[in-house]
Image: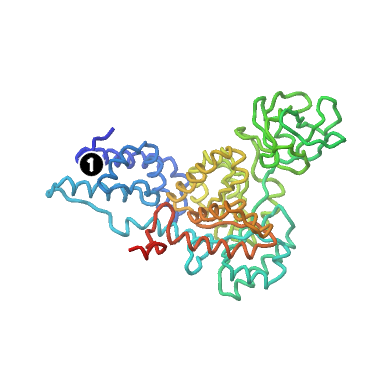
Amino acid sequence: MPGDSPQELLIELQRVRDHVSAEGQRILARWEPRLNRAAFEAGATNLAHYLAFRALDLRTLQKILATYGLSALGRSEARVMPTLDAVIANLKLICGDPGTPVPRPTADDFLNGTRELARHSEALLGPVVDGRETRIMVTFAPKAAKNAETVRRMFDAGMTTARINCAHDGPAVWSKMIETIRSVADQVGRRCPILMDLQGPKIRTRTVLTPEDGPEVEAGDRILLAFDAPEPKRDFPFQANCAMPDVLHEVKAGARVSIKDGLIVGEVEEVTADGLVVQVTRTPPGGQPLESEKGINFPGTALNVSPITDEDLRDLDFVAAHADMVGYSFVQRPEDLARLQNEIASRRPDDRPLGIIAKIETELAFANLPDLIVQGAGANPFGVMIARGDLAVEIGYERLSEVQEEILWVCEAAYIPVIWATQVLESLVKRGMPSRGEFTDAAMGNRAECVMLNKGPYIEEGIAVLDNVLRRMERHQLKKSPQLRALSAWAGLH
């Protein structure tokens, strides 16, 4: 534990700096074969330093530094070494050694990471709008894209970026969407990048058997996730098979199971010749129906499933020719990204690299995040989406707030833009009436470079409200740094 004299703090900070420098170089050397893009060199270096820095427990040191007015370490994501150098320089001044030169980072050194993040964000996600730094991405429905006036109102409300979900519709509809979006963007004099999301290997229920009188599943019931087509069995009135049956053979007894975004939660009691016997441990009060085409997750189970399907490869033919970015669902390992990069390169041999958005929605993807960033940004314009729906199911709702914070920190350290996604202002966009908690959630999104809204009948109002919330919050907070705008509410009390 460091002492609280400035001399002792200086020795401790220099020790920390030496560790970060040496360990950062070791990490960079491991990454070197995958760093093939000059635009990511500075980000990779700072990310390596950040990982070395945050491997240390700095809480006690931070508290003591705060008593000297030197507590900037907690906001060092985009500038690890300049922050350490600045604190060390100030400690040397406090120690009063006039004969020792005080190397101090310049303003350019200190702010370069923030500028790099802004530059990468604009290149990938498009320019910001006047008075608002956070972009707004909107998921398009075919109906909205048919009406140029509707799209124009979306731009007027504050939309900057468009998203098309390849899980729905097809090339003919997608072409019309893109044509309308780009035509209106040209008319209003804006660049509007388009993200197309590959569907990925979503594991879903397929055929479902339930009792004839239709009771809902409740805690204490058992569900048979069948390897083959379900057949009526007295012991298992609730049954379902899976759209990806091979996956079930990888699941072991004791594995956790979540169906329909966590509305049915259970544990694999045993593996039989017929399938997985799931003991249900939690449902909403009154139960939950077991339905077809609902997502199945196995939190904590590392499944050997390729995140790119044959259907995704067919969709990629269109995406590579028409989109600005491709969204990669259920990516988990650097090898997954390498495969997508090869597929993109084969479809765009003479064109600039396609932007890639890695959707972080599993525990393994979160654990591998630094290596995913290096693999992705080492060759392509790259961003990360915090896909909070599946991610919450996979890691547990209790951990979501902590994990999304860490994703934001690591991406800022790498100068990689982040998209804050899933159910932002969902009640407002879909039903025209927001919940109170949605505004707090939307306000938190200003720490990302982009916030995503899903489609709904009240999308224009949703965009306008989100624009208002983000503008207000940016006056007070930028990433982790308070902006210290003058508080006008109590000005008359002076």
- What residue do we see at 37% from left, 65% from top? 492
Location of residue 185 with respect to 373 vertically, above or below: below
Quick one: 200 or 234, which is closer to the camera?
234
**Color scheme of the displayed model:** rainbow
Element carrying mark 1? helix
Quick one: 372 or 284, which is closer to the camera?
284
Q: Where is residue 182? Give x, y as percent.
A: 63, 69
Quick one: 96 or 110, which is closer to the camera?
96
Q: Residues within 10 Å of mark 1 (few under 14, many from 20)?
A: many
Most distant residue in the left direction: 99
What is the quadrant of residue 277 in the picture? top right
Please give the residue where the numbered disc 1 appears in the rendered image. Answer: 10
What is the quadrant of residue 125 in the picture? bottom right
Quick one: 386 or 266, which is closer to the camera?
266
The number of numbered badges drawn on the structure is 1
- What residue do we see at 64% from left, 61% from top? 321
Q: Where is residue 117? Give x, y as percent.
A: 44, 57
- What residue do we see at 75% from left, 29% from top? 221
- What residue do we see at 74% from left, 33% from top? 218
Position of 242 with respect to 439 (left or right) is right
Q: Where is residue 475? Give x, y as percent.
A: 43, 62
Q: Where is residue 265? Give x, y as percent.
A: 67, 34
Three-letter amino acid code at the position of disc 1: Leu
Quadrant of the rendering where the N terminus is positioned: top left
Location of residue 345 with respect to 224 vertically, above or below: below
Most distant residue in the bottom direction: 187
Quadrant of the rendering where the C terminus is positioned: bottom left
